[in-house]
Amino acid sequence: MILVALETSSFVAGIAVTDEDRVLVESSLQVGTVYAEQLPVMLERALNDADVPFDQVDGFAVSIGPGSYTGLRVGLSLAKGLAFTAGKPLVAVPTLDTIALCSSFSKYPVQAVLDAGRQKIYTAGYDTSSGEPERRTPYQATTLDSLMDSVTEPVVFAGPGASKYQTTITQALGNNAL
């Protein structure tokens, strides 16, 4: 089953073409706010590089945020249009869940973090010890300080927001910041 996945919740657009459990092509580009111009070109290039004709795609996946409103709107519009045109299924995937999945089998809780701008973050906490992310807290928009105030045990911080605020998190939480 060939799946095309689109990620547009941040300033980095991503496209992957997969076949079952193999990634055929993965492409990302720092696009800022020009998603509408770059995403279709990236998609065409990814399908060509994977040697997959459009009519052989079995379905589509798209990130649904939280994240950049413009990026999400463009990604969702393109994904819906592709799925409708091809008559194929479309699945929406929460961005924070995807970030948590990257830390599968962690013995520590995982906190997925995206930068929301203006000193805010999007975040959710997960147990990934079974290999699948199981959300333990609601999706939330909050401040980094508020999140750090709630940490009482070692936590794996994951995602672009965790990278952006790594120094602040490590200084505030010490050994509890993984």
Image (spheres, helix red, strand yellow):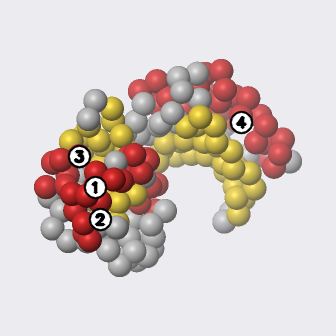
The x, y position of residue 98, in whole percent, is 46, 54
Q: Report whether 103 appears left or right of 84.
A: left
Of badges 3 and 1, nearer the viewer stands 1
Determine crowd level at label 1: few under 14, some 14-19, many 20+ residues with C-alpha closer than 10 A: many
Residue 121 sits in quarter: top left
Q: Please give the residue where the numbered disc 4 appears in the rendered image.
A: 43
Q: Please give the residue where the numbered disc 3 appears in the rendered image.
A: 144
Q: Please give the residue where the numbered disc 2 appears in the rendered image.
A: 177
Verify CB contact (< 8 Å) between mark 2 and mark 1: yes
Q: Is residue 131 above or below residue 73?
A: below
Q: Is residue 96 above or below residue 66?
A: below
Q: Is residue 134 above or below residue 58?
A: below
SS at mark 2 in the image: loop
Earlier-in-chain disc, 2 versus 1: 1
Identity, as a three-letter code, of the amino acid under mark 3: Leu
Identity, as a three-letter code, of the amino acid under mark 4: Leu
Residue 13 sits in quarter: top right
Of the pair 171 and 12, the residue shown nearer to us = 171
Of badges 4 and 3, nearer the viewer stands 3
Which disc is residue 169 wearing?
1
